[in-house]
Each structure stands twice: as structure tokens, then as C-alpha cells.
Amino acid sequence: MSATQPGGTQPAGPVQPARPKVTEREARQVAEAAREQGWQRPSFAKELFLGRFRLDLIHPHPLPADEDVRRGEAFLARLREFCETSVDGARIEREAKIPDETVRGLKELGALGMKIDPKYGGLGLTQVYYNKALALVGSVSPAIGALLSAHQSIGVPQPLKMFGTQEQKDAYLPRCATTAISAFLLTEPDVGSDPARLATTAVPDGEDAYVLDGVKLWTTNGVVADLLVVMARVKSENHRGGITAFVVEADSPGITVEHRNAFMGLRGLENGVTRFHRVRVPAAQRIGAEGAGLKIALTTLNTGRLSLPAMCVGAGKWCLKIAREWSGVREQWGRPVARHEAVGVKISFIAATTFALEAVVDLASQMADEDRNDIRIEAALAKLYGSEMACLMADELVQIRGGRGFETAESLAARGERAVPAEQMLRDLRINRIFEGSTEIMHLLIAREAVDAHLSVAGDLIDPDKQLGDKAKAGARAAGFYARWLPQLATGAGQVPGTYRAFRPAGHPDLATHLRYVERGSRRLARSTFYAMSRWQGRMETKQAFLGRIVDIGAELFAMSAACVRAEHLRAAGEHGREAYQLADAFCRQSRLRVEELFGRLWENTDDVDGKVVAGVLSGTYTWLEEGILDPSGDGPWIADAAPGPSTRENVHRPLR
């Protein structure tokens, strides 16, 4: 790929390797086949998008077992001591590397096996305490949080736990719990969220092995990993084929880590480019069936995605601490800056949002531990909402700190002030809006799940490839479904003043009014979705801006629900109940303003004119607007050559023993 110059000529550049030719429809079919089909268990968020506010699914707040609490708190105490005495976050930032002795200490502590069953040598922590541990260690060094999360949330342990054979679990889980760091390899130089174009191949070699060839990009932990989960396309006339998952030893002949990537944040991240050239992998190391790789990856991420918002909770707590301490001592015009409303509203936003985000993560995590509900949408909403709000909180902290927020911690210390890494926090958090599904992809993923009920009954009506007979049957199904469903959206508990009275105890802010708003908002959201499907039908999938707003409204309603339920739980338990109610009330009031704006922008927006501008930009209509600058970018192709073949670079793989 090469850039078009203002004059319209194409500069010469390297020819890119051929990629699998995939139509838009074929790409959708691959993604659809990888989805978890059906809903065997209830889902609070799914019901919310359908206009049904099922408070009973989240209230009373689910609680962990006493033994889980004891084991989790004991580990958190050991981890806190280790972080205080053996982790130097400033050094990791300065040297762009986690010291080997720090990694060894984490291994000895058992941090590699937090989620692995004790029978395999792990700690057996619940999702709740695993997330608390990530929030704690991530507050000291986000790079360590990323290392541990990538290893356990998407690396070898989780897919083996869910889909591995007993032989695979016996062989690899004890290693992952104690010594072996793992990585997940899906992305390629020209393949991100469109796996239908995956080019890494796995060619069967007899009945007992496969041979892997290809290049993987952005392999978090890949530089130091001992074990890899690799997604490759099986190619053989005599095999089922399709994208398939493999456990691969990182030191296998033919594997070369060609480059360690450097980023604007997370500078200690061991992320690289890995090339496979005729790498022989025993068939016994295949996870699941051929063609099941994407389904395995997506199912793994149902809970794996909770690790990122967990670390965002830790970031919010740190932002609140620094904002409180700094704005209380920094004076302007005769009083602390916190007492000036312009700064105070920022502090209130950080405090209220941190409370709500912790409520979302804890609720979704406990639901994952109980395994009573399907949390695929809840986990995705937590990731989406957490990554977006954490960036906003960090940005507000930088603004509160002013020039000191923009200055590095090292520079602050050098001139005699407290080394507060606010600008580093902002840089480190930015990747979370891209990691494990960008915000834009999360919008589409959640939207697809949110409209699943509609597509189940009316999908054939808007499918241009379906025959008239199929459309007639779909029409009959749809008529029956909507005859029952639509009347339910007219009225509900949110219109009854006395509803949810348990959330308005004497002497506390009234949270019942916010829950009634959520109930009304849920029905309004469902009506909006139905109207959009009726209006755009088969073109609905192209209305990505609209779908993004639908999802963002759902995220806010979910967060409001979680915040209210958490506040009532803390009040009933005698743990800062009054303060929790205040924070939940503040958050809901802030959230309701955002929701109303989003509802307004569903139908009053600039989407159409934006599309025209984009067409003009791509056609070169506005290249005159780019005049008067110099482009400091270097030469080279936009996307690196990923043609298969032997490596010509030094292997920078450095396993940590």
C-alpha cells in the first residue's frame, strides 16, 4: 500500500504480499460463525437492550464465598508487600523493561497462576480477586499488569481451561502457573479485527503434525514468552480447515522474534513481531477442533476482557488520590483549587466515575464467578466503558495538575518536586481503547449481540440472498414476536413513582429515581433500535455511528444500574453506605446528561454530511487543505512485508528464567 501524493501520482513502493481475497459478506460470515450462538443463560445487559430492566438479575448484589475472600485477601496482602518493596515503576518506565528479578519475584509469589486451579499449582483466585490483583499491581506498573493479564486472560491458561484436553492441561498448566510466560498471537501486519483475511497457515504434515508459516504482529509478551497460543488457517483438501488454535513452544525451530516494538505508553511491554517459518507443531497441541480458533478466542475473551477495565479502576483510584492531594494544597486566588468550581467538577467526575466503574467491574466479575448469567455483553460493556472513561479521568487529572501534569515525573523530581507520573498514566491508558477490541469494534460487537433477538426472528426479511418463501416465514415469525414485544415497551415500572423503594432509605439520596430512569431509558432504547431496523433494514449494519450511540447509551444505563446496586449493597453491609449513595447519585446525575445527549444524537447528527466529507477526503478534493506543512514521517510502506519465508533478522526472543 502506498500513499497518494497531492498531485495524484502514486510513489513507488515495495509490492505487498498477496492476502486472502475476502468479500465483505465472507468476512461477516466468518465473524458470525465465531459468535457464541444462542443464549442458554439469562443476561442482564441483553434484556436491557430489549427494553426489559431485569433488576432481579443483579440485585441483591452477588457475593463471593467466604473461602474465596480469605484466599483472595491473603494473596492481595502478599502482592501489596511485594509491590511496595520490589517493584520500581519509575525504573521500568525509564529502562523500558521489567527487570528480570521483578519477574522472578512475581513467579515465586504465584502471580503467574492467579487464575489457575490449585491442582495444577495455581492459586485458584476468583475473577473478582484476580481483577483486584491486576488493579493493584497495575497501579504501580501498568506494564506488569499487562504482562500478567496477557499471560492469564488471553494466553495459554484460559483457552486450555475452557477447551483443552486433560493431557494438555496436565502438560501446560503447571508450567504456566509457576514459570512459563504465555502470549496470544492473532494479529498480523495486515490483519486486525478482520480475521477472515488471516494469512498464517498451518499445513497438515501427516496425521500427527502441522507446519506453520506466517508473521504475527503486536504479540504482547511475545518477546519473553515460553508458550504461545497461535491462530493459523489450516489449509488442506483432506481436512476441515479454517482458523485453528495451537499451543506452540516459543523456542521451536523456525520461530524468530524479529523486533521488539516500542510505544507511546506501556514502555515496559514485551511486545514484538514473530515470524514462523516451517514450524512443526504436533497435532496434540491443537486446541479444540480445526476451524474453532476464532470461537475459542471470542469465548475466552468473555471473561478475559474484564482484566482491562479492572486496571482502569486502579487508574481511576490513583487519579482520585492525586487530584485530592494536589488540589487541596495548590492555591489560586486565595483558596485551594479544589474549591474553585471549574476544578471541582473535574474532581467530582473522577470520584463518581471511579465508583461506578468499580461497581461495573465487580458486578460483572462476581457474575462470571457464579456462572449463572451469560455475561458476554456485560464484559464487553465493561471493557468499552472502562477504557473510555479511564482516559477521560487521566486527561482531567493532567488538566488539574496544569503544567505539572504535562511534565514527566523524572523532571519533576529533578527540580525538587514530588514525582507524579500523570502524563505517563495518560499515555499508558490510551492503548486500552485499542487493546482486545478497539472502541469501534466493541461498538459493533455489542450491537450485534444487542440486536440478536431481532435478527433471530426477522433476519431473513432483510437478507437480500433469501428466497421469497424464507422471507414469508420470517415475516410470520416477526409478526408474532413484535405483537408480543412492542406493547411491553409502552409502559413499565419506571413510570410508577413508588417503584424500587428499597433504594431510597431515609437520610440518603434517592437512587430509586435513577433506577426508574434506567427502566424508562431501556424501553426507549429498545424502541429506538426497532425504529432504526424498520427504517434501514439491511442497511442497518452500515449505520455504525448510530449503532455506536445505541451501545454507549446501554453502557451508561448498565453503569448506572451497577452503581446503584453497589451503593445499596455497601449500605446494607455497613461499609461507607452514606458516602456510596452520594457517589452513586452524583454519577447517575452525570450519566443521565450524557444519555440524553446520546438519545438526541440518534436522530439529529452530522452522519450524512460526515460521509460526504470523507468521500471528498479520500478522492483528493481537499488536498489543498494540507498545503503549508512538512510531513516528518519516514519513508517505507504503510504495512510491512509479511510474506512467508525464512527470517533475515536477529532473533530478539529473551525468555525469562
Image (spheres, grey):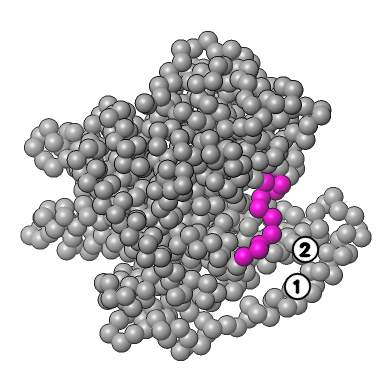
Give the residue type that dot 2 points to.
Ala
Residue 358 image label:
none
Residue 31 falls in which quadrant of the image? top right
Q: Is residue 313 left or right of residue 231?
A: left
Q: In this view of the protein, which residue sits in the foreground, 44 or 629?
A: 44
- Quickly name the residue at label 2: 458
Image location of residue 522, percent across then percent down: 55, 71
Question: Could you say whether the residue bearing mark 2 is in a helix, strand or loop?
Answer: helix
Dots 2, 1 in contact, CB < 8 A:
yes
Image location of residue 47, percent across then percent down: 59, 69
Magenta region includes residue 325: no
| Quarter of the picture holding the C terminus | top left
Question: Could you say whether the residue bearing mark 1 is in a helix, strand or loop?
Answer: helix
Image location of residue 34, percent across then percent down: 67, 46
Within 10 Å of the Cα at label 1, are there few (<14), some (14-19), or many (20+) other Cα atoms? some
Which badge, 2 or 1, is on the more N-terminal residue? 2
Q: Is residue 590 left or right of residue 182?
A: left
Q: Residue drawn at (54%, 52%), measured in percent from left and top?
A: 302
- Can residue 173 be seen by looking at this rendering? yes
> What are the residue bounds of the magenta stretch?
31-41
Q: Residue furthest right?
A: 469
Distance Cα–Cα, label 2 vs label 1: 9 Å
Query: How many marks overall?
Result: 2
Q: Residue drawn at (31%, 32%), measured in percent from left and top?
A: 104
Taken as a whole, is the magenta stretch helix, strand or loop? loop
Give the residue type that dot 1 points to.
Phe
- Can residue 593 be seen by looking at this rendering? no
Vertical arrangement, residue 578 with respect to residue 350, above or below: below
Residue 347 falls in which quadrant of the image? bottom left
Within 10 Å of the Cα at label 2, are there few (<14), some (14-19), or many (20+) other Cα atoms? many
Q: Is residue 619 left or right of residue 132?
A: right
- Quickly name the residue at label 1: 481
